[in-house]
Image (spheres, rainbow, N blue to C red):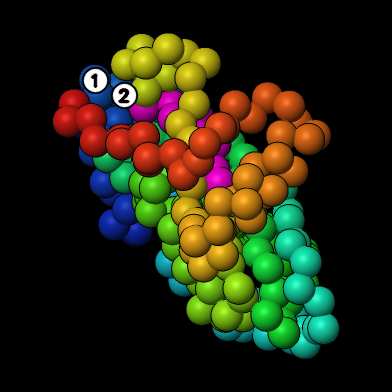
């Protein structure tokens, strides 16, 4: 198949070759600009690698005399499964118990974005979010619960189409004190009502499909 468009960017070249491998004609009207679009989209969807967490949190860490649980729930996340390069997405709920410091509330979804915008496993993303909060403000405890729909499973019919994967990371007081953990889980249930998590920690639903 003759390739008429020459791309300067190696990634766009690769996408054009991918289209040919899929049996497509990359010169047809609808596909001519696809390599450029995919290049741009993939760079955005993996922009978390370049993000500077410290710069983002700069000026958003505050000293407080407050040690009640802080919860930010229903944070939308969109990520890419590293096994299939297909999206997985859903909601992330973050809680921590301050130990002298808090993070500006609007920064928590930014932290989630930074770890979601990479090639990921939901289990690892969940842990990374918990660990960075732990590292930056040394709270008494951190809990992160993510519920994700994986298109690599749903679209290919590997699992029931409406099933979702729940992963959790519990550090400090959330790991050591079941009362603290249960309080967090109760608060998660209060609003949405559709979060069917009981008796966490949930063993990360392993996402190790070989095909
Ligand atoms: Zn996958």
Residue 47 visible in image? no
Q: Quadrant of residue 101?
A: bottom right
Residue 33 among magenta residues: no
Q: Say which quadrant the C terminus sits in.
A: top left
**Residue carrying label 1:** 23
Give above or below for 120 relative to 127: above
* Residue 84 placement: quadrant: top left
Which residue is drawn at the image coordinates 61% and 75% (left, top)?
139
Give the class, few, some or many, for how many residues have Cα within 10 Å of label 1's Cα (few <14, many ≥20). Answer: few
Query: Which x, y percent locates residue 39?
Result: 43, 50
Q: Are marks 1 and 2 in contact (CB under 8 Å)?
A: no
* Residue at 49%, 26% in the rendered image: 164
Q: Main secondary structure of the magenta part?
A: strand
Task: Give left or right: position of 161 versus 23.
Answer: right
Task: Write down the region rendered in magenta.
Answer: 145-152
At a point 26% along the width and 46% down the height, the residue shown is 14
């Amino acid at each position: 198949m003759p390739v008429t468009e020459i791309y300067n960017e190696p990634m766009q070249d690769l996408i054009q070759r991918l289209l040919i491998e899929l049996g497509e004609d990359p010169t047809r009207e609808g596909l001519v600009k696809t390599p450029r679009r995919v290049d741009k989209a993939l760079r955005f969807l993996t922009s978390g690698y370049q993000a500077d967490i410290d710069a983002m949190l700069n000026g958003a860490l505050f000293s407080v005399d407050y040690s009640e649980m802080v919860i930010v729930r229903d944070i939308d996340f969109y990520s890419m499964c590293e096994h299939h390069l297909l999206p997985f997405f859903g909601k992330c709920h973050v809680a921590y118990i301050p130990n002298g410091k808090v993070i500006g509330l609007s920064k928590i979804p930014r932290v989630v974005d930074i770890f979601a915008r990479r090639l990921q496993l939901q289990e690892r993303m969940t842990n990374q979010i918990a660990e960075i909060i732990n590292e930056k403000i040394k709270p008494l405890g951190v809990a992160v619960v993510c519920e994700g729909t994986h298109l690599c499973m749903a679209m290919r019919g590997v699992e029931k189409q409406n099933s979702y994967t729940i992963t959790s990371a519990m550090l400090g007081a959330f790991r050591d004190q079941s009362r603290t953990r249960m309080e967090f889980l109760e608060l998660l249930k209060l609003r949405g009502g559709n979060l069917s998590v009981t008796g966490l920690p949930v063993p990360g639903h392993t996402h190790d499909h070989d095909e």
